Image (cartoon, rainbow, N blue to C red):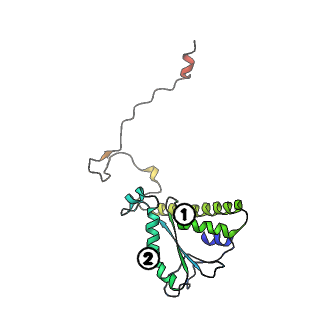
Amino acid sequence: MLHRAGKAGNIASLYEPSSFMALSNKRPDVVFHPDSGHAIVVDCRTNDVTLADSCRQCAQTPGYANDKGSNSKNSSWLRATTAQHDAFLPFCIEAGGRLSPPSLDFLRSLSFAAGGAPTDQKAFLTWTLQRIHCTSQRGVARMIEACPIIRPDSHELPFGGLVAFGLPHSPIALTREVPPRAPPCPHPAWIHNVA
């Protein structure tokens, strides 16, 4: 999606170039070539906020997963990109849709590079953000569908019996007695109160 946004913003870009990194076998997701001469190497990452090792911090600090993902990307990419005098951007988005501040700033610079009136730039930014969020949510949906725990026919789960949820207390019974419904009233109740 970033490649398409770069093309729409009239910035030359390469999508997953296989031999761009001279000193490593890494393959960036997108490489932008702005007029400044130095390439901007972008590698994308979707960060999961529900991982066991960082779930608590993600709940307490907005953007924690993006910060952790950016640090991970920087540690593996920054040395190789600075060696060939290029800039590196870890484009991080959390599974819920939050973009990292550097990623959002980059999209704003793309909208500025696209030119036009300020309203055109805002429309371009909105279009780009919508496309990125749709792409991210499609990826999250694919990940959920691929999860072996969730069955595609989950609405047909059998009721009855006991299920242990891994809690320290006793299992919870899934069956319960449902009281019978009162027969439907032929007339609304307010009709009987009319004097």
User: Is 171 displayed left or right of 69 in the figure?
Assistant: left
Total numbered badges shown on the rendered structure: 2
Residue at position x 49%, y 83% from top?
80
| Circle 1 SS class | helix
Disc number placed over residue 136 in the picture, else none:
1
| Three-letter amino acid code at the position of disc 1 | Ser
User: Label 2 neighbourhood size at 10 Å, few (<14), some (14-19), many (20+)?
Assistant: few
State the residue lying farthest toward the right: 116
Q: Real-space Cα distance between discs 2 and 1?
A: 23 Å
| Three-letter amino acid code at the position of disc 2 | Ser
User: Label 1 neighbourhood size at 10 Å, few (<14), some (14-19), many (20+)?
Assistant: many
Say if 188 sits above or below 157 in the image: above
Q: Position of residue 125 (x, y in %)?
A: 64, 62
**Position of the C terminus by quadrant:** top right
User: Is 182 displayed left or right of 8 in the figure?
Assistant: left
Say if 125 sits above or below 154 in the image: below
Q: Position of residue 1 (x, y in %)?
A: 60, 69
Residue 70 or residue 155, whichever sits in front: 70
Residue at position x 61%, y 60% from top?
130
**Mark 2 — residue?**
75
Answer yes or no: do the residues labelled 2 and 1 have beta carbons within 8 Å?
A: no
User: Is 7 displayed left or right of 92 in the figure?
Assistant: right
Residue 171 or residue 130, whichever sits in front: 130
Residue at position x 57%, y 66% from top?
105
**Reading the chain from its start, which is encountered first: label 2 or label 1?**
2
State the residue lying farthest toward the bottom: 22
